[in-house]
Image (cartoon, rainbow, N blue to C red):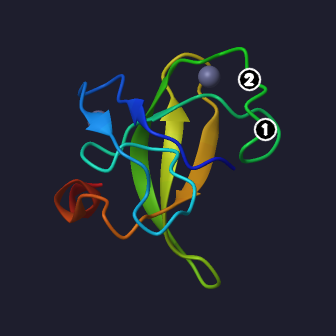
Amino acid sequence: MKNESFHCDNCGKEITKHPTGSARNHCPFCLFSKHLDKDFPGDRASECKAIMKPVWKDYHKNKGWMVVHECIKCWKKIPNKLSEDDSVDVFGRL
Ligand SMILES: [Zn+2]
Ligand SMILES: [Zn+2]
């Protein structure tokens, strides 16, 4: 996984690199993601590239809180680890 800055396709905010250097794969403001990975996290092999919306939260005993993203185009669901600076407001409403 790469730690990179990008623009959020949902809210348009510029997302800076993760403060602690771990990979960022969703927007910390609205928690939307983008369908870039195909078979495993960080492979960037998907042809889809549609936006993925946060649909629910899940608690994983080893990884902690996860956000489950669902692609608006192909309906694929991918769970992602929550980052320290993700919006707790948005996460709390999932
Ligand atoms: Zn956003
Ligand atoms: Zn997709």
Q: Image check: 79 left or right of 8?
A: right
* Residue 83 at x, y percent in the picture: 42, 64
Q: Nearer the viewer, residue 45 or 76?
A: 45
* Residue 57 at x, y percent in the picture: 43, 61
Quarter of the picture containing the C terminus is bottom left
Instruction: Please tell me in which quarter of the rendered image ligand 1 is found.
Output: top left
Residue at 28% over, 59% down: 91
The amino acid beneath tag 2 is Ser
Disc on res. 43 = 1
Q: CA distance from mark 2 to mark 1?
A: 8 Å
Q: Is residue 67 above or below residue 42?
A: below
Q: Nearer the viewer, residue 85 or 69?
A: 85
List the residue tagged with mark 2. Answer: 46
* Residue 86 at x, y percent in the picture: 31, 59
Q: Is residue 65 above or below residue 27?
A: below
The amino acid beneath tag 1 is Asp
Dot 2 and dot 1 residues touching (CB under 8 Å): yes
Q: Quadrant of residue 5?
A: top left
Dot 1 lies on which element? Answer: loop
Residue at 65% over, 83% down: 62
**Some atom of ligand 2 lies within 8 Å of the CB belonging to the residue at label 2:** yes
Dot 2 lies on which element? Answer: loop
Tell me the mark number nearer the camera, choosing from 2 and 1: 1
